[in-house]
Structure formats: structure tokens, C-alpha cells
Amino acid sequence: MSTQTAPEPPTALEILQRVFGYESFRGDQAAIVETVRAGGNAVVLMPTGGGKSLCYQVPALLREGTAIVVSPLIALMQDQVDALLSVGVRAAFLNSTQDFEERERVENAYLTGQLDLLYVAPERLSSPQTKRFLANGNVSLFAIDEAHCVSQWGHDFRPDYLALGELADLWPDVPRIALTATATEATHREIRQRLHLEDAADFVSSFDRPNIQYRIVNKAEPRKQLLEFIRSEGDGQVGIVYALSRKTVEATAEFLRANGINALPYHAGLPAEVRAHTQARFLREDGMVIVATIAFGMGIDKPDVRFVAHIDLPKSIEGYYQETGRAGRDGEPSVAWLTYGLQDVVQQRRMIDESPGDAAHRRRLGQHLDAMLALCETVECRRVNLLAYFGERGTACGNCDVCLNPPQVWDGTVPAQKLLSTIVRLQRERNQSFGAGQLIDILRGKTTPRTQQWSHETLATWGIGNDLSEPQWRGVIRQLLARGLLITQGEYGTLALSQTSAAVLQGAQTVPLRTEMARIPRGSSSAKR
Ligand code: ADP
Ligand code: ZN
């Protein structure tokens, strides 16, 4: 017999150790948990793999009632709930994949206070019915995952997120925590404002992933380059290869398999069972390489991914950072490898020109791409460039390709002028515009059926650029495009002058360029940075 005393409520650390089986909190986790437990609001910016989930799961177990977790990743709810159930946490979800009975069971569990966490899709929360339903139970806290989806200018906008601002008015006394792995200054401000988290405590972790080595190479023969890269990493390394189209995904996976790499394709066009099977193998087997569209990877927690390779240019730094962030979650050295070329720039500019939405939207997409291109073309440390995008300052990392192998820089002013004046002449004298291929043939004085058809041999600039090779010219054009000294136009992505091109033509602006893999052209000065 013992005298009855009320048991002490468990501490956050006890929950962490007893329920989740972890030794100690990481980074800001303890402070975040304490803020929310005490009823305060929080905005959490933490890179992928940083440990955001525990920031609301632990307070969910410390506070009375049910934590409502808003997550747009319906496909992952089951996994998250299963993981919680397996450690004895009472969790469930509500989404469109459930039948009526299942939904009713979950709703009853909530209403009778038998759930610690309830995951819901954002579109549900915007319905008055759901809000009434939630009001009939006891909400301990709201966790808004992937909070950057509220940003209209971001890369992942979801209109349903805008309605989440109302939670502040409907449940003024319930703490809210917004979490994201992708946040620039602007997104951060938007999250605070649109979700009515003006008074929230901010927890901003560093986005630096020191164990990831960033490498960006010029695209020549992407598949072959990819294969060489994978082989250079050693046998049986786990990796993810990202490509833009399903077709490229399949062809690349097949190519790798034919060359002895244990690779499988993954994209949204494959049957659900095939995708589930591929994902399960990736998680379970050693040395798998998944070739995927960006549909793959959200919420997949495989700690020992040794490389993430991109064979197409990502559309934004946010996307690139999130995808590369899937490498090296275990903290061991890992590589983020990207190959990109002129065609990527032309293609993406065209996709932006053709994208639905208003001019402001297209301008925003253009800015995202510009930032990505600046990272590709930088002659300074990649990591410094990347972190600067997220508002962090850093010093040269000594580990990225630029730090290890500083690019040669040469004065590309004269070639740029030759190219720009060819474009101007074609436009003024003949009212014509062309893509890179034809312009390079003109500059190099290479007669083809197409140059004959258009009598381009009679242009004053015919052959004035034969001191550079074709790949070198492609490099010049790519870099001019990347810096906005050249733009693409129309359905065929023909090249045209931009507003800033005049300064180059008039000699008011010089154009330092990175050397392509080939040697520096004759007669141009070079400087090593
Ligand atoms: P995020 O949502 O930020 O990408 P997760 O919440 O999925 O990250 O956590 C990433 C990984 O880190 C998971 O495997 C998780 O179990 C692990 N983790 C998180 N916090 C801790 C901790 N304090 N100690 C040990 N492992 C942790
Ligand atoms: Zn560096």
C-alpha cells in the first residue's frame, strides 16, 4: 500500500526518451517543444531531416486534448500515423481516401478524446463542417506542416492554406506551430502574416548541410556523365537521380540498368503498386538508385542516401535544396551532383513563357529560375551562394566543386558582342530570329542546308566567330542567358536582345565568363580566381 499522490506529469525529455526512444533533443527542438507546451505560437524553419515532426508530436503528448496536424501530403499520412501507432501514440488521419465507416470511426475517437494526434488535409479545414466538428472536441494545438504552401509566390502554393489564417480567430487560446523546410525571408514573412502568427516565436535553424558536397557540371552527354559520376562514387551507393520528364526517367533508369547499376524508375504515371514496391525496395535494399521525377522523395526518410543527382535543371533553388537535402541525413559525406546546359535554360524559359497565370506569376517563375542559374554559373563557393539565398552568411566551404577547382574566368566581351550584333543584324536587315544552333553556324561560318536556304553566308557577321568551338559558343550563349544579357522569345525559343544587352554592344559592360571544359580560346585574356 502506498499513499495516493497525483503522479507528476511527464517532462518533454521523458516523453522523448520513453515514447520515441531518443536520447536528447536536437538543435532548437527543446525550446520549440517548451514554447508550444506552454501555449505559445511558433514558426519553425528547419531544413529537411532536421527533426520537425517531434516539435509538435512531443507537445501533443504533453497537452490536454488532440493535436490537429495539417499536412498536404495525403500519401504520407498513413506512414506517419503508422509510425506513431507503432510507438503507442494514439494517432489517426482524415482524408479523401477513406470510406464513410473509417471516417466515422476516426471522428468518434476524436470526439471522445481518444486521440493524441489527428492528421487532416488542408482542404478539409477550410470547410465549415470540419470546423464545427473540431469545435465539438478538444484541440490541444494546431501544427501546420509545409507552411510555405501558404505563400502565393512560392514554388508550392496551395490555395487551401490561405484559409488556415482563420484558426487564429476560431481558436484564440489554442497554440499554433507552423513548420517548413523551405523559407526565404519573403516566405517567412508571408507565413507569419497569412497564418496570423505575428506574435509567434521564431525558430530559424541553419540551412547549412556541411556534409553535402555540391557539384555542378556542364551538360554534354548527360547519361554518360551520370554513369561516370555514379561509378566514381564507388559500388553500391544509394542514390536518387532526378529528371523532369517521365520519358527521361524511364530511359535513364534503363540505361543505368544496362550498365550494371541497380536502378529503378519512379514517376506519377506508374501504377500505385509499382510505385509502392519501388519505394519499399529503396528503403529496404542496399545500393538502390531511384531515377525519379520530383514526385519521389517527399517525406521519405532514408538516412544513408549517398548522392542526389539532377540531370535536368531544377526550377528553383527551393526545389533544388529540398531535393538535394535528401542526401546524407545521417550526417555522412554525400554528394549533390547536377548537370545542366544551354538546352535546359532555353527549355525552362519557354516553359515559363507558356505557363498559365498572369504576367506577375511568370515574372516570379523567371526570378526563381534566375536564382537557380546564378547558382550554376557562380564563380564563388556554391554553399555560400546557396545559403545566401536563404539569408545566411557563410565562408567558402572548401568542399564544393568551385572551392576545390576554381573556374577559370575569361573575358567574353568580344564574343558576346559578335553574337549580339548577329542577332541585331538578322532582326534589322531581315526581320528574322533564330535559336542557338543557327546562330552558332553563322558565327562559325559553317555552311548547312539551313544557312543556304536563308543565304546567311552573305551576312556581315558570317564566320566572325570561328575562333571558338561549338561547345564554347554554347557556353557563351548559356551564360549570357543565365545573366539576362540575352532572352528567349516565342514558341521556338529564338534568341533576342534584352534590355541590358545594349551596354555590352556599346562596350560599356564587360562580360567575364567561366571557361567551358575546353581550353581558353586564342587571344582572350584569362585570370584564375
Ligand atoms: P523533417 O520533418 O524536419 O524532415 P523528421 O521529423 O522527419 O525531419 O526527422 C528526421 C529524422 O531525424 C527522423 O528519422 C527522426 O526520427 C530523426 N530525429 C529527429 N529528432 C531526433 C532527435 N532528437 N534524436 C534523434 N533522432 C531524431
Ligand atoms: Zn565551396
Image (cartoon, rainbow, N blue to C red):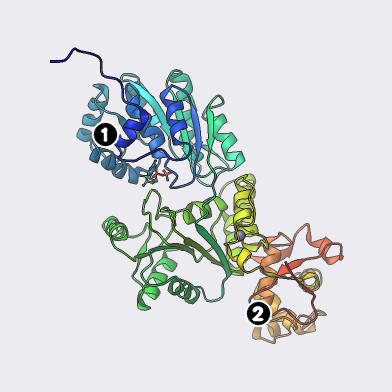
Q: Residue at x 42, y 71 (%)?
A: 252
Q: Residue 447 sits in which quadrant?
A: bottom right
> Residue 449 placed where, x, y %?
65, 85
**Label 2 Cα neighbours within 10 Å, binned few <14 / some 14-19 / many ≥20:** few
Question: Which sits in the foreground, 249 or 498?
Answer: 249
Question: Which sits in the foreground, 265 or 339?
Answer: 339
Earlier-in-chain disc, 2 versus 1: 1
Front of the two marks 2 and 1: 1
Query: Dot 2: what SS?
Result: loop
Q: Residue at x 69, y 77 (%)?
A: 440
> Residue 147 placed where, x, y %?
48, 37
Q: Which part of the image, by quadrant, shows the N terminus?
A: top left
526 left or right, relative to 358: right
Measured in 3D between alpha carbons, the distance from the residue under mark 2 to the one under mark 1, in whole angstroms, is 59 Å
**Label 1 Cα neighbours within 10 Å, binned few <14 / some 14-19 / many ≥20:** some
Query: Dot 1: what SS?
Result: loop
Q: Amino acid at mark 2?
A: Ala
Q: Quadrant of ligand 2?
A: bottom right
Residue 6, relative to residue 220: is it above or below? Answer: above
* Residue 362 visible in image: no
Question: Which sits in the foreground, 13 or 276?
Answer: 13
Q: Amino acid at mark 1?
A: Val
Q: Which part of the image, by quadrant, shows the C terminus?
A: bottom right
> Residue 140 placed where, x, y %?
36, 23
> Residue 360 placed where, x, y %?
64, 45
88 left or right, relative to 25: left
Q: Residue at x 23, y 38 (%)?
A: 99
Question: Which sits in the foreground, 7 or 289?
Answer: 7
Q: Name the residue that disc number 2 marks.
A: 518
145 left or right, relative to 288: right
Q: Name the residue that disc number 1 marks.
A: 89
